[in-house]
Image (tube, rainbow, N blue to C red):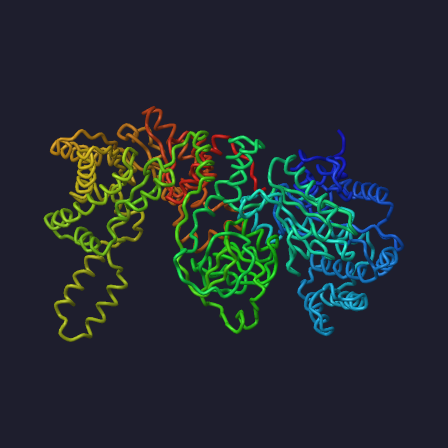
Amino acid sequence: MAPAKYVYDFDEGDASLKKLLGGKGSNLAEMTRLGLPVPPGFTITTEACNYCYQEGKYPDGLQEEIEQHLQNLERKMGKKLGNPGDPLLVSVRSGAAISMPGMMDTVLNLGLNDQSVQGLASLTGDERFAYDAYRRFITMFSDIVMGVDREFYENELNRKKSELGIKLDVEMDATAWKELVSRFKEITLEHAGRDFPSDPREQLDLAIQAVFKSWDSDRAKTYRRQYDIPDDLGTAVNVQSMVFGNKGEDSATGVCFTRNPSTGEARRFGEYLTNAQGEDVVAGIRTPNTLEELGGEMSEPYEQLTQVMDKLEQHYRDMQDIEFTIEQGKLFMLQTRTGKRTAAAALKIAVDMVGEGLINEEEAVGRVQPEQLDQLLHPRLDPDAEYDVIARGLPASPGAAVGEVVFDADTAEMRGSRGENVILVRWETTPDDIHGIINAKGVLTSHGGMTSHAAVVARGMGKPCICGAEAINIQQAERIFEINGLVVREGETITIDGATGRVILGEVKLIEPKVDENLEKVLAWADKLRRLGVRTNADSPEDSQRARDFGAEGIGLCRIEHMLFGEERLPIVRRMILAESDEGREEALMELEPLLRRDFEGILEIMDGLPVTIRLLDPPLHEFLPSLGDLRVELEKLKHVPGERDELEAKERLLARVRAESEANPMLGLRGCRVGCTMGGVTEMQVRAIIKAACDLKKRGKDPRVEIMIPLVAFRKELEIERNKVVEVADGVIEAMQTDLEYLVGTMIELPRAALTADQIAELADFFSFGTNDLTQTTLGFSRDDAEAKFLTLYLEQGILADNPFETLDIEGVGKLVRMACELGRGTSPDIKLGICGEHGGDPRSIQFCHEVGLNYVSCSPFRVPLARLAAAHAAMGGASDATK
């Protein structure tokens, strides 16, 4: 058996080896194969990374392979690593199979030491350039490999610039860089406890190990959790000969996209910096120039670059994100990958490429990820609102957000995770800010461009982002930012508009978006591919109309309890619950019936011709009653108010009744069908209101399609009792109103026993709807609120759970019950209708499972209906390519 191969030269691989060589390595190999100007190098595979991750050491033979490929590289370049007179310098970069921009580590200019920097200066005739490269290397290597915070070096650099009275790095001369190199090495010794390594071979070995370790960094793990990227993919390591964009005014470095990643417009888009290295562009050290300006500054490499961009897009048949360097007028390609894009851009690019004949409709559907559609369904600024624009920056990621200003990622995470709306305001974000960006409503930076870290990450998450708002002077220590004398303090509210780059003081009214023609086209293509129906969860005419506008094919869950909490109705519900006689309860029920009838008529009319599943009263009754704690406080206050005896006695009676109704575990107490089975008249009133509303519409020539759902059934007999009531009342109303109305009666499967005995329950049910929120709680023994507040985060961090089971269905546990119930139910009643109405009905991975087990439909919130339509198509396609990976 041949020994494992862990290292590939760029001319040995191609794009098909993406899993092994990572995205960066496979695309460098592919560009090499296409004959593009790629600096030579080699890739250490993801398999080597995974071995190191698991075993804590290199696999056998890896060190020898690295040495062999390094020698090959030295021969190609005619230089040697460590040669003091003519040194080979390399970059060491990560590159996972799925793109994770900025999440792992890169080291540039590796191979420099006190001797080789002099050789580089002599060869180039540019001492300033050589020592600039050296100080960059010391900074990156010390930070990434030796664990010394980059801030120490940045502070020293800023101090030096202040001392010299200059603002920009490019104004530093060779002497200044030499002095900083010496100081930087002192900082490394001081904080790392050892000298900066001078042996290039040791530098290379340590850098490779650091890139492998970066796969397990906190920021990388956070990013993987956010995007559901498997932990076992590993990262490849790319060792590539250096080219330099900081060799003078005829050199540059930049990032470009073959189409606009924010809008999808079919125009080249990008930024570059003259006399700079790649890190300067993404780090926001200077505000970059637009790609169009490069044509006027360096016309020949610009023309070559545009030809390469066109060639790569045609070759990959997708929008490309490209890194390039121009060294003394010569173009080099450092990376290409499928570009991250906003949802609006993804849709436009997919539709345009179908029109251009690059891809077909099915491929277009696969190019748009369901999760991305959430970005389109977020608010934007009300065009009629008046507001005070205090600053402008680059529109890095579209959408609008309102929140209180916070100045660090930890605060953003803490407050955002509590449900508070915050805007993260930074000089520029770094990969270590990922947890704050996730929990913020939006991001605002005073530096950086459209391809900076903040811009790329925010676009990927669909969060509004403004970069490069240079008028904003952030004073981190004082927790303020200042704009032309205006001071904004932490905790004050601002609004950001990521589509225009406007920063606004105070809160601006936001309005809901509408489905545009690109989304309509992609969803229409998706509808032709999917098998699953998509309904919505809606409890009001407004939500019903919104969902229908988004393409919902009916209502899968209409919750009666949500109609009962209004100021007009809640007192009536309380009288019904606390009634001391049947007459008192019946009186309250009679008051509620016409109110509910009116609601049902509005919902059924909007959903005319589509099924509407109405769940009878489900929650614990205590949710409608005053809290015991509040009543006790009110009672104590009344005891000290003279002349309030009657009110005091009434409050005491109320307290006694509420105490009598209280339960130790109400979620498992008197709720759902148990209320109907034990409290006469409750089920009947609800059914009368539903059927009367439907009959009213029928008489007006409408087509109401009613499905009545009985909740929390555990026993066949419960369903029998409740179904008999429904049928008796419904048929009586239909006869009395002299209409011809068909209706279905089914149940919600939300208890393990119901799933296990689904064959018995199916004898009496026209449909099952899986209530996976409660089914998850009762299967796992988790109280959702308590689990999420107390231990769920730790369970995710420790790997006990792969996902939050209330967001993505626990397929191994809860999913097994769902599958079993489907099989048992269809065994009894082959034509039984099966759906899901928990929050999982809007989660793409859960929708994939629903497709696999053969459900008829999923149901989700109105705003997630387009997402579910697209996810159902992806499920029917067996999964789809990810244009963002």
In this rendering, would 176 be left or right of 833?
right
| Above/below status of 757 relative to 567 | above
In this rendering, would 787 be left or right of 252?
left
| Above/below status of 164 relative to 379 | below
Q: Position of residue 797 (x, y in %)?
A: 53, 51
User: Where is the C terminus found, in terms of image quarters?
Assistant: top right
Q: Which residue is more in the foreground, 328 or 658? A: 328
Query: Measuring 53% from the left and 52% from the top, which residue is drawn there?
Result: 397
- The part of the image, by quadrant, that contains residue 846 is top left
User: Where is the N terminus found, in terms of image quarters?
Assistant: top right
Query: Measuring 61% from the left and 35% from the top, which residue is drawn there?
Result: 317
Q: Position of residue 344 (x, y in %)?
A: 50, 45
- The part of the image, by quadrant, that contains residue 718 is top left
Q: Position of residue 860 (x, y in %)?
A: 38, 41
Q: Which residue is more in the foreground, 759 or 808? A: 808
Outermost residue to the left: 583
Q: Position of residue 639 (x, y in %)?
A: 19, 72
Q: Which residue is more in the foreground, 107 or 550? A: 550
Outermost residue to the front: 296
In this rendering, would 172 be left or right of 420?
right
Outermost residue to the right: 85
Q: How many discs mark residues in the rendered view? A: 0
Query: Measuring 19% from the left and 71% from the top, which residue is drawn there?
Result: 638
- The part of the image, by quadrant, that contains residue 517 is top left
In this rendering, would 505 be left or right of 162?
left
